[in-house]
Image: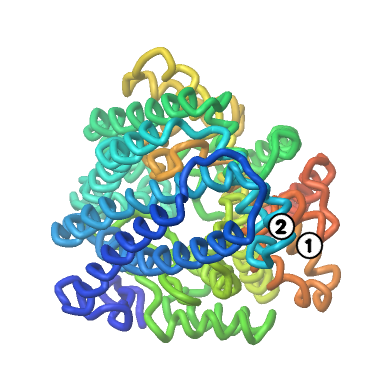
């Protein structure tokens, strides 16, 4: 398979349903509707809603088991439909039929959300200690029970919760959809090789990795101009999204949106503060790296469009076939199970790799059923394309290890959702470095450090921006100009003198779909957590591979069963201590030192 986009695969979902128009899909959709109606009947018959606290009875134990398993069954059916429809919407947002079916399904899932709220209220009144004494199913759902008891204390009245859920379809969910539709359909006019071309935003953003600085500059300026033209509706989406979150924060009695984000991330404030403090302490190291990169590129200072610029060179051409074969082989060196997962994903059409008009930018992995996932990427024939595939396949491996869990047990917070992906990405990086000459090592380390810089420094800037938006949104809406200025201010504070302050990216608030996603509350810091936690685990793997292999799959299978600090403690990590985070960042610091050594080694070589 070559590098031509026409040769890149689209994912295969024929084994799920033959098509959106097929009788099989229509039957499954109707079955989900019937199953939700039946579940409503079950909830009504058994009084699953707010109730006065009372001692646990054998009937309560029986009802709990029946309701949880019935709910799990309906959720699984719904997830399959949702993932199948999203496979069309995310690869072509202009697909009116898929958008219509998604809207239909969302109308039904609102009913499931309301049932979830009723279950939370019911659990909130239970003596869960007594329940767990009498039920093995309850014991295996301990975290779900404890988390729901906390959620129950923050519920509005049943009528208000029902209204909030129904209004969400025309509120937060609608704004998220608007952002996705607009951004996936933006076509950007950019001059390349002496001619004007109209390209999807995803392809234009890929120009950030181009070796020619003038091409990067033109791509960046064309991208910013395109965001400028679309900023009014996107700003409206952001204001409305954050306004909705603030309203529900107040109504549900949380102190702030950050409190909800920490709770949903399964971490506490002490863990968050330790991580963020360690990150800020590392800024001087990252700025040193950015200066080194500028030196390697013969620049006084990096502009924003130089952050992803390649340093060094790679003699290897990464076609999609090359990438898939390499990943399968290297995953196999870790374990046959991981290598087999990768081979299955490539052979069975789990991956949609072609960048094209109407397709969502970036990459993601979604669970669809049992142990199956589907991966969206916008593959480019470079090391970054290989690394991204490895990262998303890590998510698929995580899903594989969660396959035997109920939907409630596999509800992994974003903080832990990056665990396997970072591990797999690092596994590939180390394998490529072992085979590389100094110029390719420089190239790969540059790519890796650019990624680490994005996840530590840029994520900090995005967190600071989002906090400012949440704080100010209590008073009024923010204009697009104000959003841009807040973003620039956050970037100046985080990058410092590492970048040219005159050439930053004012529209990162429009670029990142996570600001508009279903949680809509601080998407950013969990990615930093994921990177540093993953690096810490990889360091442990290198110390004792056999011990690590014997425990790793169980850890992945348990990410929805316990709080993140408790899960980390099983591997000897104290997440509330700055020492853990510093040790993970030391891995990055060692890469910076190695990067610096390679740059200086190259500068000492005689010029041709």
Instruction: Give 172 or 586, whichever is nearer the viewer.
Output: 172
Q: Residue at x 59, y 83 (%)?
A: 339
Does 537 appear above or below 276?
below
Using the image as rendered, state which of residue 213 and residue 509 is in the foreground: 509
Q: Which residue is mark 2?
A: 535
Percent x, y of residue 271 = 73, 39
CA distance separating discs 1 and 2: 6 Å
**Residue at x 57% of width, y 31% of height:** 258
Residue 359, x across and y down, in percent: 27, 58
Which of the 4 image quadrants contains residue 159? top left
Determine contact: label 1, label 2, CB under 8 Å: yes
User: Is residue 548 visible in the rendered structure shown here?
Assistant: yes
Q: Residue at x 24, y 47 (%)?
A: 181
Disc marking residue 539: 1
The image quarter in which residue 454 lies: top right
Secondary structure type for disc 2:
helix
User: Residue at coordinates 64% horizontally, 87% vertically from top-left?
Assistant: 336
Indicate the position of residue 524 as horizontal and vertical percent values: 54, 41
Q: Secondary structure at mark 1?
A: helix
Residue 483 on image: x %, y %: 39, 24
- Total of numbered circles in the picture? 2
């Amino acid at each position: 398979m070559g590098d031509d986009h026409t040769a890149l695969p689209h994912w295969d979902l024929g084994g799920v349903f033959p098509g959106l128009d097929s009788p099989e899909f229509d039957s499954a959709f109707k079955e989900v509707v019937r199953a939700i109606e039946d579940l409503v009947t079950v909830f009504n018959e058994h009084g699953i809603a707010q109730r006065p606290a009372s001692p646990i009875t054998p009937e309560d134990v029986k009802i709990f088991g029946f309701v949880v398993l019935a709910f799990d069954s309906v959720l699984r059916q719904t997830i399959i439909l949702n993932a199948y429809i999203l496979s069309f919407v995310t690869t072509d947002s202009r697909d009116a039929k898929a958008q219509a079916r998604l809207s239909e399904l969302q109308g039904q899932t609102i009913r499931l959300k309301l049932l979830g709220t009723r279950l939370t209220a019911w659990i909130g009144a239970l003596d869960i200690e007594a329940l767990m004494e009498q039920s093995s199913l309850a014991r295996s759902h301990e975290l779900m029970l404890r988390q729901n008891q906390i959620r129950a204390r923050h519920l509005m009245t049943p009528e208000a919760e029902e209204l909030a859920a129904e209004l969400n379809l025309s509120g937060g969910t609608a704004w998220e959809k608007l952002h996705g539709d607009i951004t996936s359909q933006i076509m950007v006019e950019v001059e390349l090789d002496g001619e004007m071309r109209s390209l999807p935003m995803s392809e234009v953003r890929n120009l950030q990795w181009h070796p020619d600085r003038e091409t990067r500059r033109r791509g960046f300026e064309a991208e910013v101009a395109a965001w400028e033209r679309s900023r009014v509706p996107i700003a409206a989406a952001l204001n409305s999204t954050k306004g909705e979150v603030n309203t529900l924060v107040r109504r549900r009695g949380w102190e702030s949106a950050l409190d909800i984000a920490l709770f949903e991330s399964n971490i506490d404030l002490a863990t968050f503060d330790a991580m963020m403090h360690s990150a800020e302490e590392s800024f001087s190291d990252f700025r040193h790296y950015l200066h080194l990169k500028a030196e390697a590129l013969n620049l006084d200072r990096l502009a924003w469009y130089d952050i992803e610029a390649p340093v060094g060179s790679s003699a290897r051409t990464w076609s999609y076939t090359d990438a898939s074969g390499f990943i399968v082989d290297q995953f196999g060196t870790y374990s046959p199970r991981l290598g087999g997962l990768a081979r299955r994903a490539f052979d069975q059409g789990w991956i949609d790799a072609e960048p094209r008009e109407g397709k969502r930018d970036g990459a993601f992995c979604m669970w669809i059923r049992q142990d199956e996932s589907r991966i969206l990427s916008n593959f480019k024939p470079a090391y970054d394309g290989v690394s991204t595939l490895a990262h998303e396949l890590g998510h698929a491996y995580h899903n594989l290890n969660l396959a035997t869990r109920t939907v409630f047990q596999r509800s992994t917070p974003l903080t832990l959702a990056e665990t396997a992906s970072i591990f797999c990405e690092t596994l590939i990086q180390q394998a490529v470095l072992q085979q590389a000459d100094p110029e390719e090592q420089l190239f790969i380390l540059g790519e890796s450090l650019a990624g680490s810089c994005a996840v530590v420094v840029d994520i900090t800037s995005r967190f600071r921006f989002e906090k400012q938006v949440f704080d100010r949104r209590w008073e009024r809406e923010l204009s697009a100009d104000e959003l841009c200025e807040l973003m620039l201010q956050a970037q100046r504070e985080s990058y410092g003198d590492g970048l040219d302050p005159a050439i930053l990216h004012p529209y990162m608030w429009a670029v990142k779909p996570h600001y508009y996603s279903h949680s809509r509350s601080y998407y950013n810091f969990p990615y930093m957590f994921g990177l540093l936690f993953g690096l810490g685990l990889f360091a442990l793997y290198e110390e004792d591979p056999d011990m690590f292999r014997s425990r790793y799959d169980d850890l992945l299978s348990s990410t929805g069963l316990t709080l993140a600090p408790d899960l980390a403690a099983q591997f000897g990590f104290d997440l509330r201590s700055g020492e853990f985070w510093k040790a993970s960042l030391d891995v990055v610091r060692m890469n910076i030192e190695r990067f610096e050594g390679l740059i200086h080694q190259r500068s000492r070589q005689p010029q041709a």
